[in-house]
Structures are given as C-alpha cells and as structure tokens.
Image: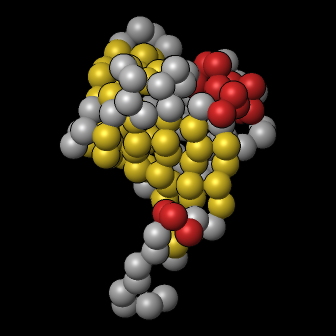
C-alpha cells in the first residue's frame, strides 16, 4: 500500500451499465475497497433499471455516499423516505427503492454499497 494515491473515475477499473441506458456505475478498486461513482439519468428508478439485474424485490445494498449533482428520492420498504441533493451525505440501509427527481442526472459517490451493485445475482 502506498502512502498517497490518486485515481480517476474517468479511467475506472470497471463500468457497469444500467438497464435501458439509464446510467452507469464507474468502479475504482482501492487498497481499502471499491469506491463507485454512479450516474443516474433522468427517468432512472432502481425497481425498473437495477431490479432486473439484481434479482431482488428491493435494493439490498448498504449505502454510504455523497451526492455530487442532481436529486434522488429514496423510499425504504417500510415507507420511510428521504430526498437527497447536491452536497448531501447519506446512509441508506438495505431494503429500498430510489429514483431520480427532475430532468438532471443524479451523480453520487458511494464508499460502501457499490462493490456488488448492478451485478447479476
């Protein structure tokens, strides 16, 4: 492990496209685990564009992240909901759906939940 490092999401180790061309996940693998940048296009919804890939009824990823741009609504399986936007830090437990709000892509970074995100079960 080096004492200092820099990586670019524009040269990601892996890019995973979402169903229907509604975005992608750029994944960078680090000594401390994967970090992801997701671009969720307007009209994206987990239950429409990731559920067919994941094969679960709701998102089972545990997220710890930061919204760079755009807005998203997150709804837990029990109905609890939250809207996040630019500059917001968020944590989301497994068991939720989410969708983009408005006409701007939502770009988010995640340090915990994107390692297995948008991969076939």
The quarter of the picture where the C terminus appears is: top right
Q: Is residue 28 visible?
A: no
Q: Is residue 77 visible?
A: yes
In this view, the residue farthest toward the left is 87
Total number of numbered discs in the rendering? 0
Identified at 72% across, 43% down, the residue is: 119
In this view, the residue farthest toward the front is 103
Q: Percent x, y for residue 79?
A: 41, 8
Identified at 64% across, 19% down, the residue is: 48
Q: Is residue 24 above or below residue 99?
A: below
Q: Percent x, y for residue 98?
A: 47, 22
Q: Percent x, y for residue 8?
A: 46, 70
Q: Is residue 8 above or below residue 94?
A: below
Identified at 43% across, 24% down, the residue is: 100
Q: Is residue 12 above or below residue 90?
A: below
Q: Percent x, y for residue 81?
A: 34, 16
Question: Left or right: 9 with respect to 120?
Answer: left
């Amino acid at each position: 492990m080096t004492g200092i490092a820099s990586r670019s999401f524009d040269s990601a180790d892996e890019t995973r496209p979402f169903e229907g061309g509604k975005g992608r996940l750029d994944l960078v693998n680090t000594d401390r685990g994967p970090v992801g940048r997701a671009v969720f296009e307007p009209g994206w919804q987990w239950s429409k564009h990731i559920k067919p890939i994941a094969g679960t009824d709701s998102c089972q990823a545990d997220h710890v992240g930061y919204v760079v741009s755009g807005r998203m609504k997150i709804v837990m399986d029990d109905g609890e909901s939250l809207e996040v936007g630019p500059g917001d830090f968020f944590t989301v437990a497994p068991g939720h759906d989410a969708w983009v709000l408005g006409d701007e892509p939502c770009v988010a970074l995640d340090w915990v939940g994107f390692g297995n995100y948008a991969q076939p079960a």
